[in-house]
Image: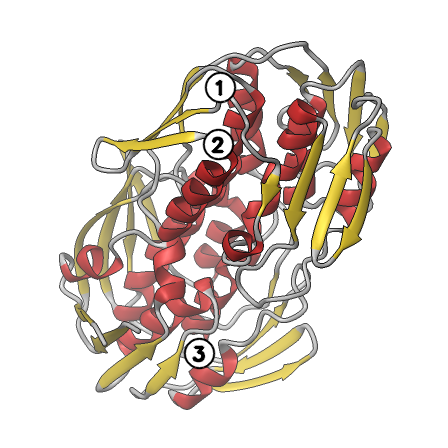
Amino acid sequence: MDSILVTGGQPLIGSINIAGAKNACLALMPLTLLTEEKLILTNAPRLSDINTFKQLLTSLGSEVDLANNGQEIQLSSQKIQTVRADYDIVRKMRASNLVLGPLLAREGQAIVSLPGGCAIGARPMDIHIETLEMLGAKIILKDGYLHASAPKGLKGCKIKLRFASVGATENLIMAASLAKGTTIISNAACEPEVGDLIDCLVKMGANISGRTTSTIIIEGVDKLYGTTHPVISDRIELGTYMLAPVIAGGKLEISGGNIQLLSAFVEKLTQIGVSIKKSNDRIIVEGPQERVKAIDIKTGVFPGFPTDLQAQMMALLCTANGTSLLHETIFENRFMHAPELIRMGAQIEVSGGLAKVTGVSKLKAAPVMATDLRASISMILAALAAEGQTIVNRVYHLDRGYENVEEKLSNCGALIERISS
């Protein structure tokens, strides 16, 4: 199992390009199940999660080819050979549940294992199930699999989500696109990745309105078509690399990202004294000369502070001047990185969904373990500023969501290398 070795104390100077969004691409790939024609996704990120979803779709009968050095995904699903999504594949990644809606819409049935992924909370399937049942599906849980069928087809209706779940919103939109009649989803997730999914579906012939609102209206159509669609840039990767020079010192020019998708995050960085400038298509972030100010953070659904940037922000606040409070409202078990940061000298107290972080002047290197995807990059960020050499273990999580981390950071002066076991 690979590890990452980081020698701290080197400021970052250079440029970094942001890849396509993992979470957007994983929602776009199952769209191939809704059409017999070819779907081409460009600006795709080169990640292990993409390969896992490729494996899943191939097991269902889809043809999936990677072109342009992996940045273009060509998908074709002329015939679905099986509607069973096996545990051995689904257990690796939470987004695997996004085949449920498309399979129901096209084949009228689906057998999908309960999903896996990072152990950051229960993330139950109940909202997915109850909303698809409102469209006319019958779903039972048996031996760890969801057995879903739509004997009379899917029919549109009014649905109010009791929580603005991104995954449930995406599954519902895909299923409703081929349902009979009109589906109105209220309290829908407004994340940019949902908007990207809608944009691609509209290109494929879907009739959807309300893209940027919490009320989405879908007029079911009889058929969807192939198209070519660029994946939006990864706002979480952008936020992560915006934090890097603030933690390690230095100055980075970041291209390919959309800062408008991170308004709540950018507002917090500005408040603690971080310099953020835009020049043409680049975002320039310069680390402060002194310790940043402490600040309180509360994660929330879009456009709130992203839960996927909470671990990285905690790494920064470990050396802030004062005491910060981080309130996690999305996942109930997303402070597993805190004990690892404490090993590096951080002062953190966790109580339920609240973490109290008292800044220290300097972190110190230590062997640490990546407990999930975002925790893994937070360990690397902390190690960039720590005294000595930090070894981050179990970095297979990292490869699920960050493309060429060692190369991007080392090109900017970081002393970082991968150690293969």
Seen from the viewer's position, the closer of residues 202 and 385 is 202
Seen from the viewer's position, the closer of residues 395 and 329 is 395
Q: Is residue 292 left or right of residue 200?
A: left
Determine whether the residue tagged by mark 1 lies in a helix, strand or loop: loop
Q: Is residue 129 visible?
A: yes
Disc 3: which residue:
318
Q: Which residue is found at the position 82% from the left and 26% from the top?
A: 151
Q: Mark 3, residues whose alpha carbon is within 10 Å: few (<14), some, or many (≥20)?
A: many
Please give the label number shown on residue 331: none
Q: Looking at the image, is mark 3 or mark 2 earlier in the sequence?
A: 2
For the N terminus, the image quarter is bottom left
Query: Residue 256, position in %: x, y?
Result: 30, 37
Q: Is residue 368 above or below residue 243?
A: below
Q: Is residue 46 left or right of residue 341?
A: left
For the C terminus, the image quarter is bottom left
Q: Is residue 308 above or below residue 294?
A: above
- Marks 1 & 2, CB-CB < 8 Å contact: no
Q: Looking at the image, is mark 3 or mark 1 earlier in the sequence?
A: 1
Query: Residue 51, position in %: x, y?
Result: 37, 46
Residue at the front extreme? 81
Q: Is residue 227 above or below residue 112?
A: above
Q: CA distance from mark 3 to mark 1?
A: 52 Å
Disc 2: which residue:
61
Amino acid identity at mark 1? Gln
Query: Residue 188, position in %: x, y?
Result: 72, 36
Seen from the viewer's position, the closer of residues 5 and 273 is 5
Seen from the viewer's position, the closer of residues 244 and 117 is 117
Amino acid identity at mark 3? Cys
Determine whether the residue tagged by mark 2 lies in a helix, strand or loop: loop
Q: Which residue is found at the position 28% from the left and 35% from the top?
A: 71
Disc 1: which residue:
78
Q: Quadrant of residue 255?
A: top left
